[in-house]
Amino acid sequence: MVLSTYQVCYARSAVLQVKNDERVLNTKPLWLVIKDAAFYDADSDDLVTAGVGFSKLSQAKIEDKFVNPNSPSVYELRRAKLNRYIDTRTGEGTYWGFKKQDLTPLFDGKVAGNEIQAYMIDGDNNVALLLQIPLDFDQDNPCIVAVPTMDSQGIYNAKDIQIRGLWGLKHNCAVVYNDKGLGNALFDLSNNEGYMINGQVANKSVAHDELLFSPDSAFKHTENTHDRFAPKQLYSKHNPEQKWGQYVLNSIEFAFYQLNEMFSPTHEVLFNKDNTHVLVYGVSDGAGAALKAGELDATGIIDGIVAVNPQIQIHQTPLTPLFIQYGQTPKVPLETKSLIDYSSYAALYLPCAVLAIKEQEAYRSVPDVSNFFFANNRCNALKEAGLLTSESTAEQAKEALQKLYQYGWTKEMAYQLPHYYYSQSINLPYQYISEYGRYGLDELLCDYSVASTNQEPLFNTGQVAPLTKTHFARLWVNNSGSLPIRLNNDIIAIDLVNNNDPTGARREFYSHSPNSDVIDYNLAGAMCLRDTLLERRVNEGLFSVLASGKLNQIKTIIVHGQLNVRNLPDFSARAYVALNSYVEGSFSNLRYIEVENASYLDSAMPFDNVLIPIDYYGENAMDWLWRNLTKNTSLPDSQIMKTQVRGGNIGFAPAITDINIPPIMQSAKQANRIKLDNGTIILPN
């Protein structure tokens, strides 16, 4: 049911009164464009499961069905976007998210309420916003939960909505999402089409201002225009990361405006920062945005922040020395590296190091290690390029792995590394380098472009090919905002391709360097990307996104996986909390929770037997923050969570129990306590 912006499907109740005797009218921000609004009754449709309910989502992956696959309806697209299989063996559905124990035959986790789509107009950049207001929004004790979306995701992604957003809705809060200026914004260059905020496709010539993204430049070479696409993060030329914090604050302003517009009969301001609890809850890039919002919030809008596995990079100078200490051992300097530095370093050496990882982990199966058919070619190519010195392939692989250890990864992380690279190849550093350097489509950074590729699971060599297994209109459901875009575990529809492969453009995993007669995973491209770190434009872009560590004394809990191979703890969370302790000292309200056996991945296959789900601790931290704000309880100590993996074989790990994931303790044992002292982070042995 679609409503006009000002209709309200709520029974009127007693509302808060503004303390100031002056009549303050609700004013729409000049940058705000409201697109659509709908009410969901929690029967045929709802805010978090699109009418499916928890029971069906937790039984099996539901097949998406479209009346016309080439032109899905808005309703079909939204339902497909929220169609996520919930593996209850990981603990979701018992320990966090939907709680099976709270469900009944009449209540299957569906949440009724209003949903409003909007844009923030920032120059020629559209930032997507989504506000969900539950039917039982508590007007007497109002609260807002802001969720900057994870990674490069759009506003409709099931994990944010069904975990972080659901937490807010269950606490009778309004929940507002923003896509951080990234989002599900792929553009089809061949057909001049892109996505609107509701997922529908429109032509740039007809709906330029309505599209989430439309590039302002074309490819340099006409032969590289066929079957090519433009993701927003790679080619918008905006570097939105420098404005992530501002976008979060803008989303909160949108939420306040809309709540006042819906509930105030006289259009006076009823809800403001003085009478409304405002929390920010983000994961990964969303967690980084949450922290940056706290740094910008000098007026006290935000009451609390939970940041899980934050993608955060700090501004460190010789005048702000940081240290790390383990137990009673002497403290040592905490040297930080940027995400584009260590991720591009991994892209250089990992395709060779997998051979040593396979040997090192010979006693167990390592996910995706068997997919590296040409690892020996990469090792030899690194040797020929002077980047390795060992003679035999086996020794080259060991040397490459040792380089990764010296750069920040640990032996305990090695088990994840083949999957980490196989699932994303060079895409992670490429997307951030392209963003920071504001590279355009016409520049073909390191001779890469984004293309649809062969979608046959067999006899696939990653060559560029038209979309055959799906349609661009349907692809919105699969797109996460990052590359590659998968149709399922076996089929990649769109990926970064090497235009300079002598056998024709193809995905890096099947690619030759320009002067190579063997597949070496395009070492030349990886080396080129490392070289861009020296370019002024990239360094200026990186400098503009670095965090200050000054959180304005906002109550904040950072949760980070100790085995996070994507956002290495020393260079992200540990560095940030150390800097905060230096900048804010005894005035800081930051707590740090580090989780053993946790990474950026969850506890599903193929890591169900060795990793603990970090999302449990994110929600646990939100519960602590909420009790602090509403019941004045103390925040927990900074601490290491001593977890226990599920064990067993891949795919057959037993269900998680209390033994695996002990809760955050208000007063941690001395042996588990983390101390933060004027720039030094002290971790237990």
Image: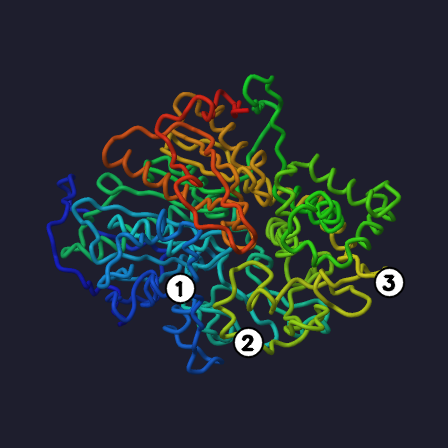
Q: CA gap, disc 2 to disc 1?
A: 26 Å
Most foreground residue, 440 or 362 = 362
Sequence-first tag of 2 and 1:
1
Residue under the image location 23 percent in, 34 percent down:
631
Tell me, for residue 470, which label it has, or none: 2
* Residue type marked 3: Asp
Vertical side of 461 occupied by 639: above or below: above
Q: CA gap, disc 3 to disc 1?
A: 48 Å
Q: Residue furthest bottom?
A: 68
Q: Would you say residue 522 is visible in this rendering?
A: yes
Q: Position of residue 359 (x, y in %)?
A: 74, 46
Q: Position of residue 403 (x, y in %)?
A: 74, 38
Q: CA gap, disc 3 to disc 2?
A: 33 Å
Most foreground residue, 596 or 565 = 596
Quadrant where the C terminus sits is top right
Q: Is residue 349 left or right of residue 94?
A: right
Q: Which residue is mark 3?
A: 517
What kind of element bears circle 2? loop
